Image (cartoon, rainbow, N blue to C red):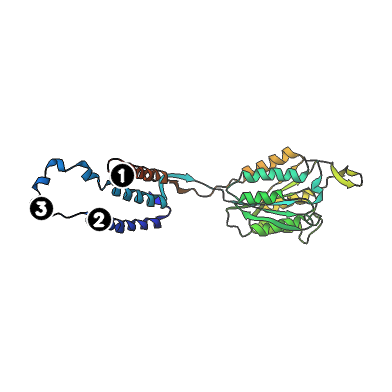
Amino acid sequence: MIFANPTYLYLLLLLIPLIAWYIWKIRKSQASLQVSSSQAFDTPEASSYKVYLRHAPFILRMLAIVFLIVVLARPQSTDNWQNTSTEGIDIVLAMDISTSMLAEDLKPNRLEAAKDVATSFINGRPNDNIGLVIFAGESFTQCPLTTDHTVLLNLFNNINSGMIQDGTAIGLGLANAVSRIKDSQAKSKVIILLTDGSNNMGEIAPVTAAEIAKTFGVRVYTIGVGTQGEAPYPFQTAFGIQYQNVKVDIDETTLKQIAATSGGQYFRATDNASLREIYSEIDQMEKTKIQVQEFSKKQEEYKTWALLVFALLLLEMLLRKTVLRNIP
């Protein structure tokens, strides 16, 4: 048994003055009477069981204090040992949030579908460091690498198209993601880049960013989102929202080149189901296990000691109120 707060055990030293005070009090309370002989008081009837019990309340009180101090020290058992393994993977999601992501060939639209599937992906990897980079005409880090997935998902849900300058800067978004993961000490470093367009902004070419990723040992999975041909897109007009079919223009050649250069893979998501399958496939591919570690599973044991404290105090009270009751 170990203690979470062992310093509280020093409180046991307080028992020394308490015991000394009790002994002094008992001796002081005893009256002295001079008699010629004490033989008359030496009969068996004079030795009542109450004589032996008169110190019991104090002993019970001291034991209760001892056990209370043990409770404060938080006893824990470490008998349960088990093996475990964790994922040695850091992942950055690089997501396109340009206005073209509002097209509704995926439901309710490309952006919301991508957020929904990515959320399930994050929830399925509780041991990984995961970060989030968003890009359109420019790029910034929405969330750095973290294992606090609650914070990550809150920031993820706050993503909306129009947060940053419109456009599609794939190279800039990828370079930003690489800068966030390049110094990671994880066994495997992965970027999942999702876009629905072609690079038309930014100072960094997508292939150049892919070469940078390769240099730092980062594997990039690219996902092109959009149906084949045309997709319905909502336009705001003076008469409300009007839908018009627009051409789906995904630079698959560049996305395939990015994936090939970094050792990743390219996927095409034409609907919600295929997007889920893509994330599921990536999830299965990126299951690198690091070394198995043995650790001790601690369990709190204070409840038993707390019950003993209660039982001792109750017994002390019963003795004082019944067998050892003093009549004024």
Q: Secondary structure at mark 2?
A: helix
Residue 25, given in percent of the width and then of the height, sits at 26, 56
Q: Secondary structure at mark 3?
A: loop
The amino acid type, in three-letter code, at marker 3 is Val
Q: Mark 2 or mark 1: which comes first in sequence?
A: 2
Q: Mark 2 or mark 3: which comes first in sequence?
A: 2
Residue placed most toward the observer, 198 or 153: 153
Residue receiving disc 2: 23
Q: Mark 1 or mark 3: which comes first in sequence?
A: 3
The amino acid type, in three-letter code, at marker 1 is Arg
Residue placed most toward the observer, 275 or 327: 327
Does residue 215 appear left or right of residue 96 in this picture? left
Residue receiving disc 3: 35
Residue at mark 1 to residue at mark 3: CA–CA distance: 32 Å
Furthest-front residue in view? 328
Say if residue 25 shows up in the picture. Answer: yes
Q: Nearer the viewer, mark 1 or mark 3?
A: 3
Residue 15, given in percent of the width and then of the height, sits at 32, 56
The amino acid type, in three-letter code, at marker 2 is Ile
Residue 63, given in percent of the width and then of the height, sits at 32, 49
